[in-house]
Image (spheres, rainbow, N blue to C red):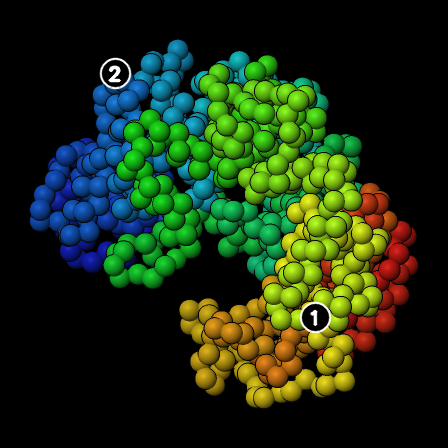
Amino acid sequence: MENIKELIKNTFNLTENNIEIFNNIIEKINITGKDKFIINNLIANKLDFNSICAYLIVEYNLFDNNYDKDIINLSQNLKVIYNDNLYISKQEEAEMLRKQFIAMCKDIRVIIIKLCLVYYDANNCKIPLSAKQKDLLITTRNIYAPLAERLGLNKMKSELEDLCLKYLEPKIYNELEQNVLLKKSENEKQIEITKNKLQQILNDLGLTHSTIMARQKHFSSIYKKIQSKAIPLAKIYDLIAMRVIVDTVEECYAVLGKIHGIYKPMEGRFKDYIANPKPNGYQSLHTTIITENDRPMEIQIRTYEMHRNSEFGVDVAHWIYKEKRKTTELDKKLAWLREIMDNSSSLNSEEFIETLKTNLYSGRIFVQTPKGKVLEFPEGSCLIDFAYAIHSEIGNTCVGGKINNKMVPLSTKMNNNDIVEIITSQTGKGPSRDWLNIVKTSQARDKINAFFKKELKEENIKNGKQILELAIKSKGLVPAKILDNQNLNSVMFKYAFNNEEELYAAIGYGSLSSNQVVNKLIQEYEKRENENKPPKILTSLIVKKNKDGVLVDGDSGIMVRFAGCCNPILGENIIGYISRGRGVTIHKCDCQNIQYLEPERLISAEWADKSVSYKIVNINIVAKQKDGFIAKVTFVLSNLQYNIVGFDTKNVSDKMYCNIKVKTSFEDNLTKLDKALKNIEDILEVNIR
């Protein structure tokens, strides 16, 4: 009891009224092991003092109208999530879950408290499982663990999934545990070697405020890998992972470069979740290296802030009084759940739960063939997507289908766990152009386009040219003037067509929008008309951020935004473009799209922060696709002491295209950098600007 009192007092800055409320509650109860577990987890997840009071009030039925209004409201919402019925029907269970989620939507704290209660109950299951425990674990696996992930509570999500695996699949769990124990000694030795090398890297970079952590990968994560890649446990080697935590994003990239300088990275296993965060906001750099024992090891590199968000989600301390707060990141995380609740009035309880499950899986669905093969699709995919995923011929000849043994139209959308069967006919009409507006997968869309391209080429060429000419006339322009060779060549280059027939055919069979082509043709025409006209500068902008993080013009307060085509960064030369009804858009001065903008609406712009002592340099690299290429580039940049602030790669055919942003001084002439990069084997082209 005294330990809990001290913990509460040391954690929260309590008022005299708070102390009186807490003492009043504590005097009426005996603190149990469950209470200690729940309270410690609530504090770890950054919940407030009122949340702990509300938990104890509901747990011990201490309802009293003399408490603060917030505690009373939270207690009433929390009461809904308590249910001790041992035997309830599936329909009653679904209705109970619906009521719980309604309460959760009213206050984020209810969700966190519920997850902590679920965590405690799952942690106290025992084999053989009772019927109630089994139902709890299945619901935890299907709903509460994915819910924790959607909220960014990755630590809790992994622990819940491990408990579900431990008790629902004990044989698999024990096999994983034994396998890990067999490799424990070898793994510990490798951890020590790698940790020492990582520490030396941090010392070399002068990063004294940093942390190195080693962890055993969660069994549920290992099991998912076994299932998804269809490989035996004996072939899973990367059972351990290491984590490097530093202060800044720049330090993350610097550490990555040094690691790739001493360890060979595995091709295709580098993920930049800093530049491209996961849907739940997760950020980190992931790379898998080959260690001294020739085994792979994953290393994650992140800042302390990223680590806090990853382990415990977004801080909910600011989510207290809904009527007094502005929209936060947490609101965005809950928007999908509130939308489900708003649209659930027409659903029965079981339909509501199925809708909830589908949305919890981050926009992906998993369906089965009649023989049990599992296929993954984007949410909203239909039977046509399924047919083309099986084979092109199945898609081209499909005329209907069955979902869960029930006949349905081809446009029917699939849901998680559906069993899908496709019906084909060799005498059918084949694909319809309308299918292009229905399918969700690029695979299906590409195969449909391929069918029309091959089967109706001559007709498509004729129709495509007519469609394009009509689109030009609809804008009050003369087709003969717009469709000259220079304009057409620019469009064909942009869309990678070899000749005009391919361009017209693409428009004719619907894979390319005539409006897209016309807009590009008009841009080319106007660009040539205005080639000798210098941009007209009307005024200037001072770009800064206000207290809410919104970009504004420092003098007028006009809102501005960054152009998505070039994403300017503090320190780069910038220019503004007055958009119709959308304020001012900021481009980099060397952005290629500026040439297509109306010159009279361009305005000069500069950063408000005059103390910037660096510039941002873009490095564009074209290279052959070879193992270890990224490691070589990051090693060179690290050795030359360039701070990487952005890194993006894509593969086309047998080539790799890299765009890297680095921070450097204004005095740097970049000659040494250019020479060092061009000396890397397999690099075909380097362009620094």
For mark 2, does the 10 Å Cα neighbourhood hold few (<14), some (14 to 19), or many (20 or more) residues?
Answer: few
* Outermost residue to the top: 128
> Which structural element holds mark 2?
loop
Q: Residue at x 46, y 68 (%)?
A: 549
Instruction: Find residue 443 and report its horizontal and vertical position in percent.
Output: 66, 37
Instruction: Find residue 673 and report its horizontal and vertical position in percent.
Output: 83, 66
Instruction: Find residue 228 and report its horizontal and vertical position in percent.
Output: 62, 27
Which mark's residue is nearer the viewer, 1 or 2? 1
Q: Residue at x 65, y 81 (%)?
A: 599
> Which structural element holds mark 1?
loop
Among the 4 quarters of the image, the one containing residue 255? bottom right
Where 411 falls versus 669 (above or below)?
above
Amino acid type of disc 1? Val
Where 244 falls versus 546 (above or below)?
above
Where 550 falls versus 5 (above or below)?
below
Q: Residue at x 71, y 23 (%)?
A: 235
Relative depth, front residue between 564 and 677: 564
Residue to which mark 2 is pinned: 87
Instruction: Find residue 186 and report its horizontal and vertical position in percent.
Output: 69, 28
Determine which of the numbered discs, if any, sits on residue 478 in the image: 1
Q: Which is more N-terminal, label 2 or label 1?
A: 2
Relative depth, front residue between 235 and 94: 94
Q: Residue at x 67, y 55 (%)?
A: 467
The answer to whether 671 appears left or right of 62 in the picture is: right
